[in-house]
Image: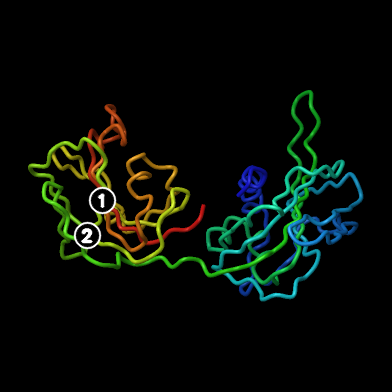
Amino acid sequence: MRRLLAILIPGLLLLTACGGSPAAPEPTSQSAGDVSKLDSLKLSDNGEKKAPGVEFSKPLEVSEPTVKVVTEGTGDRVKANQIAEFSYVAVDGKEGKTLEDTFAGDAEPVELNDELKQGSPLIYNAFVGAKLGSSLALAVPGSAPQAGAEAGPTQLIIIKLLSAKDAPKVLEKPEGEDVTPPAGLPGVKVNDKGIPEISVDGVAAPTELIAQDLIKGSGPEVKESDTLTVNYVGVNLVGGEKFDSSYDRGKTATFALTGVIKGWTQGLTGKTVGSRVLLVIPKDLAYGDAGQGTAKGDLVFVVDILGARQA
């Protein structure tokens, strides 16, 4: 998401997680919060790829995060577990000054999954069930007053729902074509529980990052900006000690590819969903000389890429 939503939404999630209404069993698009404060809000259509005109009585102040369905579209209803795409314009509630406008650019995505449902039922219930083409108003209370300064103004965000598509499928295990790796790499065998086991006997220290497919998946290509769902196991190249494994925890891991060690970011970018990838990572692309916990020096991972979605 763009700059303003990236700042507002995390705080909004915390507020609505604590104080939002519980999600409906079969949610439809719902207005919620200090809705009467938005009674004066009027939108005017300025044409395609242009933000609507926004008029309201000023100053606008709400005491809690508030969502209102302003106009209903004529398209299909947005469903749970879809990725909804939208444009928005944000204004300050005191003077109506435009803070950000994304209508002229690419649409913004939000995945309507259980994580959003639990973290922000207000947002989830506003999107799920709304018809494409609808306009929603999101009003967020201003920041608390600081010593010697006034409280920040309420911020008003007008959201236009543009499209929705099913979220990418998350696999249970790697799926694709087996690949025979070249000689000299760590050996990988799968035990009777389906868990990869790594052997590093006789393997030389890497001079550069190695990202070798063991199974070549047929899914979409991973982008550096994606969030991945994976299973993995990691060992030290020297000694072969296992220091981490999602398999041992019995739960897949989900993370932004930009938020991990460089060896993962560089090695998994361009791979495909469904792949099993052997990573041999020099220490300078891992945790350096200091290491992290029992992960030290050059590292070896086997990573199963089970799903990828846009950040």
135 and 23: which is toward the camera:
135
Give the label on residue 233, or none.
1
Q: Amino acid at mark 2?
A: Ile
Query: Marks 2 and 1: CB-CB under 8 Å?
Result: yes
Which residue, given by chain and number where applicable, does mark 2 sit on? 195
204 versus 135 height, above or below:
above
Percent x, y of residue 100: 73, 45
Image color mode: rainbow
> In the figure, is residue 96 to the left or right of 199?
right
Residue under the point 79% across and 46% down? 91
99 and 94: which is toward the camera:
99
Asked which quadrant contains residue 29, the reply is bottom right
180 versus 25 height, above or below:
above
Asked which secondary structure carries label 1, the reply is strand
Percent x, y of residue 305: 34, 58
The total number of labels drawn is 2
Residue under the point 61% across and 64% down? 84
Percent x, y of residue 23: 63, 66
Residue under the point 41% across and 55% down? 222
Mark 1 Cα-neighbour bin, 10 Å: few <14, some 14–19, many ≥20: many
Asked which secondary structure carries label 2, the reply is loop
Asked which quadrant contains residue 113, the reply is bottom right
282 and 93: which is toward the camera:
282
Residue under the point 78% across and 61% down? 68
Percent x, y of residue 154: 79, 44
Q: Choose the circle earlier in sequence order: 2 or 1.
A: 2
What's the CA distance linking mark 2 and mark 1?
9 Å
